[in-house]
Image (spheres, rainbow, N blue to C red):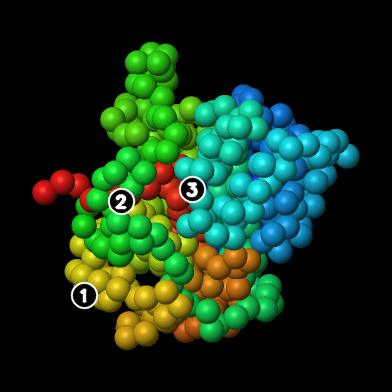
């Protein structure tokens, strides 16, 4: 398989025939659908101009200290950087919040975008771009580390982030004020597109993935090609055989969600991690960690190293370094397992930033 158009392979200098190249071929579904996600976001239809989209990507990659990724998007701009306007300023302000403090995203922030002329589709696409480049930045860094690049890191920041503690949602439902493994609901701040307004072909796409009854996915369906590619990327990362045990991929998703403060995502993936690992007490201990406290304390040696790496990769900018990879290899993780850990963690830089941007969780009625 040739990945001549694979931005990630190119920037991470993945050599043909290497163990990492072979692992990416095993995870071909994730690799190819990451490529398709990039194409759908930057070349697909949207009310956002291509110049606006690329200018946002340049900035978000720069904020992650991924200078090569930022330069890649800058090259695609061909010196056509859009003129500074109040509209672009509002988009960049939204991007800064989502990049550094996604838990601070709010319904008021979406209202501000609307006041600057952004349509519902444009807001969804804008959020997808910011979240996707956040994913790409971590994926590039992780692959460089697997590739043996001596990237400096920080092993002392595997701590939980802040989260929402307001007791009521915007639409006056009971809201969770602590991380939990119970099943939660999610309510959007921006109207989901009614199922009847999708074309028959679009309805078939939603139904194929089981998204037709979900407000979240019908909201993301305002840019359906991006949602489709993203869903297939998700499945290629989490629902594949061999490599890292599925429970540990779900653990990585939970850790990223704890760092970013996404109670909803953590509830889904902590529940899966506890069920699959048959260690619900270890997952409950992870969920209970308070802001600023260690996420890995009290866990087994293998889980400690995975948690510390996932937390460092989830920081903004990421701080995962060569020492993390050494510790993971000492725990016996091979190249395919390392790739799975990187992709599972990085994907939740994308997932959390959408969940936290576009709505909020609520507690189902008893």
Q: Position of residue 34 (x, y in %)?
A: 55, 44
Q: Position of residue 153 (x, y in %)?
A: 63, 78
Q: Earlier in the sequence, mark 2 or mark 1?
A: 2
Per the model, the C-alpha gap separating discs 3 and 2 is 14 Å
Using the image, tell me which numbered label, if any, was put on residue 281. 1
Q: Which residue is mark 3?
A: 106
Q: Position of residue 353 (x, y in %)?
A: 50, 51
* For residue 52, side relative to residue 29 (left or right): right
- Badge 2: residue crowd in 10 Å (few <14, some 14–19, many ≥20): some
Residue at the top extreme of this rendering = 200
Q: Position of residue 70 (x, y in %)?
A: 75, 53
Residue, x 39% and y 59% (percent of image)?
164
* For residue 157, side relative to residue 47 (left or right): left
Residue, x 30% and y 51% (percent of image)?
168
Secondary structure beneath dot 2 equals: loop
Position of residue 244 relative to residue 24, above or below, is: below
Q: Earlier in the sequence, mark 3 or mark 2?
A: 3
**CB contact under 8 Å: marks 3 and 1:** no
Per the model, the C-alpha gap separating discs 3 and 1 is 33 Å
Q: Which residue is mark 2?
A: 168
Q: Earlier in the sequence, mark 3 or mark 1?
A: 3
């Amino acid at each position: 398989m040739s990945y001549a158009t694979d931005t990630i392979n190119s920037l991470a200098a993945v050599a043909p025939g290497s163990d990492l190249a072979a692992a990416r071929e095993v995870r071909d579904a994730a690799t190819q659908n990451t490529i398709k996600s990039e194409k759908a976001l930057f070349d697909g239809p949207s009310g956002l101009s291509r110049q606006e989209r690329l200018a946002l990507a340049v900035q978000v990659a720069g904020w992650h200290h991924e200078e090569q990724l930022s330069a890649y998007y800058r090259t695609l701009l061909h010196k056509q950087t859009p003129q500074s306007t109040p509209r672009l300023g509002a988009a960049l302000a939204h991007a800064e919040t989502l990049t550094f403090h996604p838990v601070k995203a709010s319904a008021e922030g979406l209202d501000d975008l609307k006041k600057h002329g952004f349509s519902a589709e444009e807001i969804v696409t804008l959020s997808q771009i910011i979240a996707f480049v956040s994913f790409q930045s971590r994926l590039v860094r992780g692959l460089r580390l697997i590739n043996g690049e001596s990237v400096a890191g920080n092993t002392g920041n595997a701590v939980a982030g802040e989260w929402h503690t307001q007791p009521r949602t915007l639409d006056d439902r009971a809201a969770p004020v602590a991380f939990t493994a119970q099943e939660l609901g999610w309510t959007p701040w921006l109207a989901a597109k009614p199922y009847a307004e999708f074309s028959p072909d679009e309805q078939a796409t939603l139904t194929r993935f089981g998204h037709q009854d979900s407000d979240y996915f019908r909201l993301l369906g305002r840019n359906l090609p991006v949602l489709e590619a993203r869903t297939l990327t998700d499945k290629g990362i989490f629902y594949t055989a061999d490599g890292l045990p599925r429970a540990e991929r779900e653990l990585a998703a939970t850790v990223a969600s704890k760092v970013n403060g996404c109670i909803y995502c953590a509830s889904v993936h902590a529940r899966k991690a506890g069920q699959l690992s048959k260690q619900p007490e270890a997952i409950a201990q992870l969920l209970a960690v308070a802001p600023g406290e260690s996420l890995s304390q009290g866990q087994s040696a293998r889980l400690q190293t995975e948690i510390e790496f996932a937390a460092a990769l989830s920081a903004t900018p990421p701080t995962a370094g060569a020492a993390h990879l050494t510790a993971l290899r000492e725990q016996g993780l091979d190249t395919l397992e390392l790739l799975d850990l990187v992709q599972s963690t990085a994907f939740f830089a994308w997932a959390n930033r959408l969940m936290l941007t576009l709505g909020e969780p609520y507690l189902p009625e008893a």
